[in-house]
C-alpha cells in the first residue's frame, strides 16, 4: 500500500541577505498509514522547515526548486487546495506562543473547523467539547469561552492537540510538542498523544530532539543533518545499531538516550555555507579524501534501514568520542 | 469588568482635581491684570479696586483657589469677566460643536487609518506600502492651516462644492438643541435637509483636522500588524487553514490595534489642540475660537472653564479608550488587578 505521506527528493531554498541557502536538500521520507515517523536532528537542521513545507506554510522567501510531497496520493505542493488542510493536523512547538491571546480558545479552533470540517457550528462546538474531554481538559464546556492565558502550559498543549484533531485528520504533524513543558507534563502529553493517535488510527510525523521520546513514540525514524537525511530506518534498528557516523555520535554522546542532542565537536554549518560533498565530513571522525567529492547515496543497511554514508559498518568511534 | 471601569474612573479623579488647581495657578500667574482689562484704560484706581472686590480678586490667592475648587465641584464656573454671562452657558453651545468636529475627525482618522495601515503592512515594502508611507508622512508634515486654506480655495471657491465656513447654513437654521450635535439633532428632528447641510459644513474642517491623526494611526497600525504577522500564532492559524482575508482583517488586526487604540487616547489631546487652529480658519463656533477670544480678552474665568472642560473630556475619552482596550484584549483587565 502506498504511504499516506511521502516526501520525495524535496529541496527548500531560502533567500536571505547572505545569499540563497538550501535548507533542505533531497529529503525523501514516508509516513505509512497508521504509522509513526520521528524526525531527529540538531537545532537548525531543517526539521521545522520540513513540517512547514508539508503544511504549506513556508515563509515568503522560501521556494521549492525540486521534489514533491504526496499526501493521500495527491501532490500537495503544486495543488494546494483546501482539501489537504483539515486532513493534516498540526501540533506546534510552543503552546504559549501558538495561541492568539485576544481570542477565546473556542473561537480560534472553531475558525479552522468552520473552513475544513463538515457540519454546522453547533456540531463543531459539540465535537470540540468531546475532544476537550478526550484530551482531559478540566471543565471542557467552559474551556471554549476561555482565553489562552487562563490555561496552564500543559492545558494549552492539550488544547492544541484537540485542535489538531478537530477536523478529523488522517495525519498529525507535531513539532517538538513537549519541549516547552516540564518533565512530568511532557510525559502526560506524550502518553495522551500516543493513545489518541492509536485509538483513531492516525499517522504521526513527530519532530523531536529527544531520543527517549523518539523511542517511546515512533516506529520509524529519519535522522536529519544540515537539511539532508543521514539515516533512516525502524526506530529499534537505528537506535540499537546506528550506521551513520553522525547518528552514532549523537547516540554515543547519550548512552541513556534520554537527553537532548548536544556536544558533537564542531557546529552545524551555516545554511548559506554548506561544505561540498557529504555535509557532515568536516565534523566526521572517519572522514576521508573522497567525502568532500560527491554527495553520498543512500545505501541499504538492513530491512527498511538506509544510510547516507559509504563507510557505514563497523567503525570504531569510541576513540573519537574520548 | 465593572470593577475595572470603576477603577479607571476613580483614577481619573485626582488627575482632574490637580488640573483644576494647576490651571488656576497658571492663569493667576499670567501677568495681565484681569481687573485692568475689564475696567479699561481710563479706569481710576478706585474703579479698579471696586472691580477687584466684586470678583474676589483682592482676596489671598489660596482663598481664591479654594473658592474656585468649591465652585467648580458644585458645577458653577462663575461668570465670564468679559461678557458677564455664566461661562458654563457660553460653553454649553460651543462644546458640542468642538466635540462633533473632533469625533468626526477621529472617526475618519481611525476609519481610514486602520485599514490603510493594514493594507500597507500586508504589502510590506510593496507599492501600496510606499504609497501609504508617502500619505502618512505628508499627513504629519503638512501644516493644517495651509491645508485648510487650500481646501477652501479648491472645494469652496473654485468648484463651489462645499461651504467655506461655519457650522450650518444660517437660512436652514440650527436644529432644535437636544444633544448639541447637529448631525444627531437634525436626525432627531427628522430634518434631513439640516443633516445634509451640517454634514457639508463638517467635511472640510473634519478632513483638515483628521489628517495628522490619520497618518499616525496608519503608521501605528502598520507596525502593529507587521509585528503581529511575525508571531507564532499567525503561523499556527495559517497551518489550521484560516482564510487569508479573515486572518489578516480579524485575527491579526485585533492584536495589532491594541497599540493603536492606546494611541488614540493620546491623539485626542492633539486633536483638541489642533481644533483651535482649524476652528479659527473655518469660523467654527467651538471651544477653540472661544478659548482664543478668552485669551485675547484675558478672561481667566472663561479660560479656566475651557481648560477644565477639555480636561474632563480628555479624561472621559481616556477612560473609554481603556475600556475599549480591555474589550479588545482580555489580558488588560487582569494586568491591572
Ligand atoms: N524564514 C527564514 N528565513 C531565513 N532562514 C530561515 C528561515 N526559516 C528557517 N531558516 C533557516 O533554516 C534553517 C533550518 O531552520 P529550522 O527552523 O527548520 O530548523 P529546526 O531543525 O526546526 O531547528 P530547531 O530544532 O531549533 O527548531 C536554519 O538555519 C534557519 O536559520
Ligand atoms: Mg524547529
Image: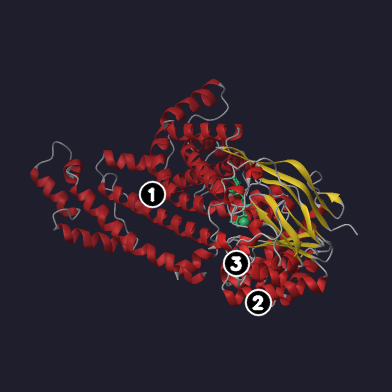
Residue B109 lies left or right of residue A310; in this view the side is: left
Residue B91, disc: 1
Which residue is farthest top? B158
Residues indicated by labels 2 and 1 sit on the same polypeptide chain = no
Mark 3 CB near ligand 2 (8 Å cut): no
Of A43 and B202, the residue lying toward us: A43
Where residue B83 sits in the image (x, y, percent)? 29, 45
> Disc 2 sits on a residue from what chain?
A
Circle 2/circle 1 CB separation < 8 Å: no
Q: Give the letter of the chain under mark 1.
A: B
Q: Nearer the viewer, mark 3 or mark 2?
A: 2
Tell me: A172 left or right of B75: right
Q: Is residue A180 above or below residue B213?
A: below
Q: Tell me which label, 3 or 2, sits earlier in the chain.
A: 3
Q: In this rendering, is residue A207 above or below B112?
A: below
* Point 60% across, 51% down: residue: B253
Tell which tag, 2 or 1, sits nearer the viewer.
2
For label 1, the SS is: helix
Whether residue A130 appears in this view of the structure is no
The chain containing the residue under callout 3 comes to A
Mark identifier at residue A148: 3
The reply to whether the C-beta atoms of the residues labelled 3 and 1 are less than 8 Å apart is no
> Within 10 Å of the Cα at label 1, are there few (<14), some (14-19), or many (20+) other Cα atoms?
some
| Coordinates of residue B104 in the picture (x, y in percent) | 52, 44
User: Mark 2, residues whose alpha carbon is within 10 Å: few (<14), some, or many (≥20)?
Assistant: some
What x and y, as percent, mark residue B285?
42, 40
Q: Is residue A108 visible?
A: yes
Work out how far the residue at label 3 is from the one at label 2, CA to CA, in angstroms.
20 Å
Q: Which residue reaches farthest right?
A: A1
Quadrant of image for the N terminus of chain A = bottom right
Number of marks in the rendered image: 3
Amino acid at each position: 500500500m502506498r504511504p499516506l505521506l511521502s516526501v520525495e527528493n524535496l529541496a527548500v531554498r531560502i533567500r536571505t541577505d547572505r545569499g540563497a541557502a538550501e535548507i533542505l536538500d533531497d529529503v525523501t521520507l514516508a509516513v505509512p498509514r497508521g504509522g509513526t515517523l520521528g524526525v531527529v536532528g540538531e537545532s537548525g537542521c531543517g526539521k521545522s522547515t520540513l513540517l512547514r513545507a508539508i503544511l504549506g506554510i513556508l515563509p515568503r522567501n522560501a521556494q521549492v526548486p525540486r521534489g514533491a510531497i504526496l499526501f493521500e496520493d495527491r501532490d500537495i505542493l503544486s495543488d494546494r487546495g483546501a482539501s489537504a488542510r483539515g486532513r493534516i493536523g498540526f501540533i506546534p512547538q510552543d503552546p504559549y506562543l501558538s495561541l492568539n491571546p485576544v481570542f477565546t480558545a473556542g473561537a480560534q479552533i472553531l475558525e479552522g473547523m468552520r473552513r475544513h470540517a463538515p457540519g454546522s457550528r453547533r456540531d463543531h462546538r459539540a465535537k470540540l467539547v468531546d475532544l476537550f474531554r478526550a484530551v482531559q481538559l478540566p471543565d471542557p464546556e467552559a474551556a471554549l469561552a476561555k482565553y489562552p492565558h487562563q490555561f496552564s502550559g500543559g492545558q494549552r498543549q492539550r488544547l492544541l492537540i484537540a485542535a489538531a484533531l478537530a477536523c478529523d485528520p488522517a495525519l498529525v504533524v507535531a513539532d517538538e510538542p513537549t519541549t516547552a513543558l516540564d518533565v512530568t507534563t511532557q510525559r502526560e502529553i506524550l502518553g495522551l498523544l500516543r493513545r489518541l493517535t492509536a485509538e483513531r488510527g492516525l499517522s504521526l510525523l513527530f519532530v523531536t530532539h529527544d531520543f527517549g521520546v523518539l523511542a517511546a513514540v515512533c516506529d520509524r525514524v529519519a535522522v536529519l543533518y544540515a537539511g539532508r537525511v543521514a539515516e533512516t530506518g525502524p526506530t529499534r534498528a537505528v537506535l540499537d545499531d546506528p550506521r551513520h557516523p553522525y547518528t552514532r555520535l549523537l547516540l554515543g554522546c547519550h548512552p541513556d538516550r534520554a537527553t537532548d542532542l548536544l556536544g558533537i565537536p564542531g557546529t552545524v554549518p551555516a545554511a548559506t555555507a554548506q561544505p561540498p560533498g557529504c555535509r557532515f565530513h568536516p565534523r566526521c571522525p572517519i572522514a576521508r579524501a573522497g567525502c568532500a567529492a560527491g554527495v553520498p547515496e543512500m545505501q541499504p543497511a538492513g530491512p527498511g534501514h538506509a544510510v547516507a554514508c559509504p563507510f557505514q559498518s563497523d567503525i570504531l568511534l569510541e576513540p573519537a568520542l574520548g | 469588568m465593572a470593577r475595572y471601569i470603576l477603577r479607571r474612573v476613580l483614577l481619573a479623579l485626582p488627575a482632574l482635581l490637580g488640573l483644576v488647581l494647576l490651571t488656576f495657578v497658571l492663569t493667576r500667574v499670567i501677568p495681565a491684570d484681569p481687573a485692568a482689562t475689564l475696567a479699561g484704560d481710563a479706569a481710576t484706581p478706585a474703579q479698579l479696586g471696586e472691580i477687584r472686590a466684586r470678583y474676589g480678586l483682592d482676596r489671598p490667592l489660596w482663598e481664591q483657589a479654594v473658592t474656585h475648587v468649591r465652585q467648580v465641584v458644585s458645577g458653577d464656573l462663575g461668570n465670564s469677566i468679559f461678557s458677564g454671562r455664566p461661562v458654563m452657558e457660553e460653553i454649553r453651545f460651543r462644546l458640542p460643536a468642538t466635540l462633533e468636529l473632533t469625533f468626526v475627525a477621529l472617526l475618519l482618522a481611525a476609519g481610514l487609518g486602520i485599514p490603510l495601515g493594514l493594507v500597507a503592512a500586508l504589502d510590506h515594502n510593496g507599492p501600496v506600502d510606499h504609497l501609504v508611507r508617502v500619505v502618512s508622512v505628508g499627513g504629519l508634515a503638512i501644516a493644517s492651516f495651509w491645508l485648510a486654506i487650500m481646501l477652501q480655495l479648491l472645494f469652496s471657491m473654485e468648484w463651489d462644492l462645499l461651504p467655506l465656513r461655519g457650522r450650518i447654513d444660517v437660512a436652514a437654521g440650527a436644529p432644535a438643541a437636544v444633544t448639541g450635535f447637529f448631525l444627531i439633532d437634525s436626525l432627531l428632528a427628522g430634518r434631513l435637509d439640516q443633516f445634509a447641510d451640517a454634514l457639508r459644513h463638517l467635511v472640510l474642517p473634519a478632513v483638515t483636522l483628521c489628517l495628522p491623526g490619520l497618518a499616525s494611526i496608519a503608521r501605528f497600525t502598520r507596525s502593529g500588524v507587521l509585528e503581529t504577522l511575525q508571531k507564532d500564532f499567525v503561523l499556527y492559524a495559517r497551518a489550521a487553514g484560516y482564510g487569508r482575508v479573515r486572518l489578516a482583517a480579524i485575527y491579526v488586526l485585533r492584536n495589532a490595534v491594541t497599540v493603536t487604540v492606546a494611541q488614540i487616547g493620546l491623539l485626542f489631546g492633539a486633536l483638541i489642540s489642533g481644533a483651535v487652529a482649524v476652528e479659527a480658519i473655518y469660523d467654527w463656533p467651538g471651544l477653540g475660537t472661544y478659548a482664543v477670544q478668552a485669551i485675547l480678552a484675558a478672561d481667566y474665568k472663561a479660560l479656566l472653564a475651557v481648560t477644565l472642560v477639555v480636561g474632563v473630556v480628555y479624561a472621559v475619552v481616556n477612560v473609554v479608550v481603556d475600556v475599549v482596550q480591555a474589550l479588545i484584549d482580555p489580558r488588560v483587565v487582569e494586568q491591572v488587578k
